[in-house]
Image (cartoon, rainbow, N blue to C red):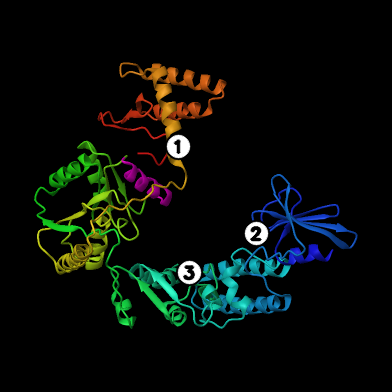
Amino acid sequence: NDVIRKLLHIQYERNDLDFSRGNFRVRGDVIEVFPAYRQEGVRIEWFGEEIESLSFFDPLTGKVTGKSNRIVIYPARHFITSPPRLKEAVENIQLELDERIKYFKDINKPLEAERIESRTKYDIEMLREMGYCNGIENYSRHLTGRAAGDAPACLLDYFPDDYVMIIDESHVTLPQVRGMYEGDRSRKQSLVDFGFRLPSALDNRPLNFTEFQRHAQRVLFVSATPADYELEKSEVRVEQIIRPTGLLDPEVEVRSTNNQIEDLTLEIKKRKEKEERVLVTTLTKKMSEDLSDYLSEAGLLVSYLHSEIETIERVEIIRDLRLGKYDCIVGVNLLREGLDIPEVSLVIILDADKEGFLRNERSLIQTIGRAARNVSGKAILYADKITPSMEAAIRETKRRREIQSKYNEEHGITPVTIKKNIGDIIERHFQNQEEERIVSEVEKDLNLTEEMSRKEIHDKIKSAMLLAAQNLEFEKAALLRDAIASLEKGEKIISLFLKQDADNKGKVVKFQKKRNKR
């Protein structure tokens, strides 16, 4: 009927077996639709040519969760247009394709000409027959009727003329706005140059910075270290330095790089005795990893944190630092904005005198500020000389500290360390407690020793694994299976959480049941 045709037109697919988002199914006088944007399905019940009932239901159980007199179903995909506009868009795409083929042939690039012709003709056929094709967003300029170079539509277009835009951490956010356009352009230009996409694909893009500025007429920049752009654009500047907790900005001390590693190790151990935490920043990922290894061998609980660590694992590492599973985190450029860890009382900056992005005035102020959540906050900068950036950062930190100190004296405020709950977005803490219980139980039963041969260890673990599986203790069986896999790779298993490197160097490291464990 008309409803089915309209569902097909707005890119829903009929599938009576796989009821997933973007699909619908028909069962007698009932049409069930799973909107692409909802957690629940829509059930349309008919009596002849009339709708008898409209309801929402759970796609898994089929249980009705609510009824309604009116339900709006939006398209399953973003790019939906009318048949006349689609026909016009296809004609324009064909014209652009003809021009592009001629261009490649004129400059003696037959491979690129063949590539763009085959890819685009396939997309045109899909658009004509289905009204959609993979990568349809690359034809958005033709589908929306925009001219080449026109700004794309965005959410900001729907805001009222007098709205206020608040940009948090503006010194970082605004460069990212600039970078989005440039990065997108660079990637797509390569696709266009080698015949993977038509030049119109370049107009499927983020706003460039000039276009963004047109939308940002009333802006509130929020930053502890505003950049030159914000300072130039701001008609009014307001400082919010006073903290209700009375906490002062950390004391800053500059120390020589001579014996800096031994010195920072002693400082971390002092904080460990007080059950406080430490952040150390380096200039390179390699150095952060090497320093983590060194500090671990010195008896400290350490992890490194840099861009190659996945987002979820970063959250886990920071949470473990707060819980006391780590004494220290060594990082590069992630220990800056938005990282509020009240337990951290010491920030150590290595190579503070190496002028550059990671050691300019703003970066130093932001990094030093990570110790401003603790009443014992302190920052140590290791350097052989005091650079202009260091001098400016130290001066600004001292100025803010004096303002807060004066305010505390006038109002009788005693600084207090921030109290902040330790959350866990994946409730990993309780999972690990159960895992540790299983490990302890299994290790007690196995009683592995270094005197055992590889075959004895293998047979013992395998027998325990089969027994656990027979008893339906699958978590235990999985742990033992991973131990067998490590053993078969040539690693000498001493216990379920300890293994010896296959190169027989005798280095004992954590056994990784999960990929992200250290």
Q: Residue at x 60, y 66 (%)?
A: 119
Residue at screen point 54% across, 69% down: 197
What is the three-letter code of the residue carrying label 1?
Phe
Q: Nearer the viewer, mark 3 or mark 1?
A: 1
Query: Which label's residue is closer to the chain start, 3 or 2?
Result: 2
N-term-proximal mark, 2 vs 1: 2
Element under label 3?
helix
Please name whichever residue, 293 or 436, is drawn nearer the observer in this view of the structure: 436
Q: Is residue 455 magenta?
A: no
183 lies left or right of 503:
right
Name the image quarter holding the N terminus. bottom right
Specify the label residue 36 is tagged with: 2
Front position in the image: 34 or 125: 34
The residues colored magenta run 310-324
Q: In the rendered image, is residue 484 in sight?
A: no
Q: Which residue is mark 1?
A: 430
Q: Tag 1's secondary structure?
A: helix
> Residue 45 placed where, x, y %?
82, 56
Decide if residue 226 is on the left or right side of residue 354: right
Q: State whether residue 318 is above or below residue 209.
A: above
Q: Quadrant of the C terminus?
A: top left
Residue furthest toward the right? 48
Q: Quadrant of residue 220?
A: bottom left
Identify the residue position indicated by label 3 in the image.
188
Mark 3 and mark 1 lie on one chain; the one further toward the N terminus is: 3
